[in-house]
Amino acid sequence: MTHRTFVLRSLLASSLVGLGLLSSPAHALFSDDEARKAILELRKEVRDQSDNHSERLMQSQRVQLQLSQQIDQLQQEVARLRGQIEVLTKQVADTKQAQRDIFLDVDARLKRFEPQTTSIDGEEVTVAPDEKRDFDAAIERFRNGSYDQALQALQTFAKAFPNSPYMPVVLFYQGSSHYALKDYRNAILQQQAMVKAFPQNARAADALLIVAGSQIELRNFNGAKATLERIIREYPDAPAAATAKERLELMK
């Protein structure tokens, strides 16, 4: 018999005695003190069980709260890490772009100093980038009819690049600029200097034609005739030789 069963029977016996359904000797087996004690113990047991249930419920709620807090913390940490990843990704992209910009800038700077291959009167030569740039700028002025500016640019070029493969052309256009400016004496001196320095150049015969033209303008017909005959003699296959023959015919 369990304690609870005993208590319940005691309570039942007490109730029966109270109702006159149980004889006095039977009631004597369960005193009032024992009944009260049994009731108190029963109440305590019920209260303990209730307290245990409440404690378990509270503990479960605390665990759920802790889990919820941990989930929130993890979500915040994930958000923070995502933010860091986005920042790092942008920094990497910016760094790569900066490296590309630096490379392109350095490459552009180096190309300004790298020799370039170009053709001068049908001959392949190697020149510096700034050398080609200055020459092209001077010739462009001549072609635009700015002969005084072209002459100044060509003279500056000759001083800056005295050994340039462009020099035969530079001297030729210097003489041509003088001629266009009607400075015939300097045109003669410049073109004669060009032919003397580069007698085999493709422009030598044309340079002598300008010399002859300048001599005619200065009324030096004998000098012009001698120059034209020189063209025919020294450069018979040049197109300028045919022009020289025509002018000689006109001078007769």
Image (cartoon, grey):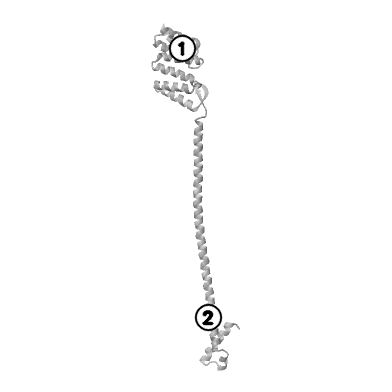
The residue positioned 45% from the left and 15% from the top of the image is 191
Q: Nearer the viewer, mark 1 or mark 2?
A: 2
Amino acid of disc 1: Ala
The residue positioned 41% from the left and 18% from the top of the image is 177
* Distance from Cα at disc 1 to Cα at disc 2: 141 Å
Amino acid of disc 2: Arg
Which of disc 2 and disc 1 is earlier in sequence?
A: 2
Residue closest to the far top: 252
How many marks can you see?
2
Q: Quadrant of residue 154?
A: top left
Q: Give the labeled residue for mark 1.
A: 242
Residue 177 visible in image = yes
Q: Residues within 10 Å of mark 2 (few under 14, many from 20)?
A: few
Q: Quadrant of the C terminus?
A: top left
In what element is the residue under mark 2? helix
Question: Mark on residue 24?
Answer: none
Name the residue nearer the viewer: 208 or 236: 208
Where's residue 83, x and y in %? 49, 52
Where's residue 44, x and y in %? 54, 79
Where's residue 122, x and y in %? 51, 21
Residue 239 visible in image = no
Q: Give the labeled residue for mark 2.
A: 43
Name the residue nearer the viewer: 106 or 236: 106
In what element is the residue under mark 1? helix
Where's residue 198, x and y in %? 50, 16
Name the residue nearer the viewer: 252 or 14: 14
Position above or below: 199 against 95: above
Q: Quadrant of the N terminus?
A: bottom right
